[in-house]
Structures are given as structure tokens and as C-alpha cells.
Amino acid sequence: MKPLSKNEIPSFLERFGNFKDAEFRSLEVLSASQIKLTFALQDKARAFDWITLELEFSSIEDARLLDNNKLSFVDMGDGCSLIHDDEKFAFGIGECYNISIIKNSTCYLVSNNLKYQEGLF
């Protein structure tokens, strides 16, 4: 897993098209303060080939999670939001511009650390 810094977020989201039309594959609770999300999405750096991307959030402060059996029904047409605000990383489904809006999302996480890993489709 590679750490993702706040300065890398804009280019990271651009590379993966803001996760638009991605497939939300799994949500795994690793511990009380660590959660891993897995997506299948297109990678602009690989000529828009499909890859698997894992996001691992740790030191989680707040979250709204979905059961894995509901993930395939999540509409990823608007992609997701990944922001860094007030020294925290926040992830939410859809277009969100700050942490308070992200907390209205179907599924969201607010944490102190974020890592990612790319894999084969």
C-alpha cells in the first residue's frame, strides 16, 4: 500500500476519472479503526484499461457503511469524492465539496490516514 498525500488527491482523482461508473466491489472492516474499500475502475494512465483499486483508511473518526451485498446497487454514475480538509481525509459517494456534505452520502468515511494499492482487474 502506498500512502496518498493531500497534494496528490487532485491528480489521483483525475487519473481515475473521479471513480465515475466504477464498480464498488467490497468494503472490508479490518479493525475498529481501519477499513478497506475495493473498486474496479478505468485508469487513464493505462489507456483507460480496467484495474482494481483498494483504498485503505485508518484512524477512522466517522463512517457510514453499507453491507457488501448492497454495494453492487450503489450508483457510481457521479463517481465519488475524496477530499482532505482539517487534516482529515474524507471519502463519499457522489459529488461532495466538504466533509459536512460528504456526511450526507450513502456511504462515507472520515479518517486521518489513507493508502492505496493498484491491482489487476
Image: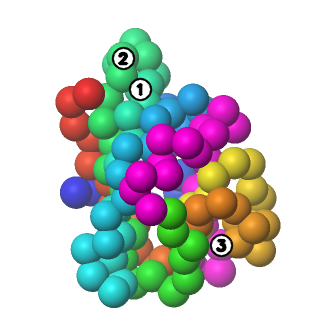
Of the two numbered discs 3 and 2 in the rendering, the one whose residue sits closer to the viewer? 2
- Boundaries of the magenta span: 67-89
Between 82 and 70, the one lying in front of the other is: 70
Residue type highlighted by circle 3: Asp
Q: Is residue 23 left or right of residue 10?
A: left
Q: Which residue is mark 2?
A: 49
Dot 1: what SS?
strand
**For marks 1 and 3 on the same chain, the one whose residue lies earlier in the sequence:** 1
Secondary element type, mark 2: strand
Is 13 rendered above or below residue 35? above
Q: Taking 95 as reference, is 72 left or right?
A: left
Q: Which residue is mark 1?
A: 43
- Give the Cα distance between marks 2 and 1: 6 Å
User: What is the CA distance from the residue labelled 1 to the residue labelled 3?
Assistant: 25 Å
| Tag 1–tag 3 contact (CB < 8 Å) | no
Residue found at the far front of this picture: 69
Q: Is residue 86 magenta?
A: yes
Residue 85 screen position, x and y as percent: 65, 73
Q: Residue at x 40, y 13 (%)?
A: 47
- Quick one: 119 or 87, which is closer to the camera? 119
Q: Residue at x 36, y 84 (%)?
A: 33
Among numbered discs 2 and 1, the one appearing first in the sequence: 1
Q: Are marks 2 and 1 in contact (CB under 8 Å)?
A: yes
Relative vertical location of residue 38 with respect to residue 83 in this rendering, above or below: above
Q: Residue at x 45, y 82 (%)?
A: 60
- The residue at which mark 3 appears reads as 85
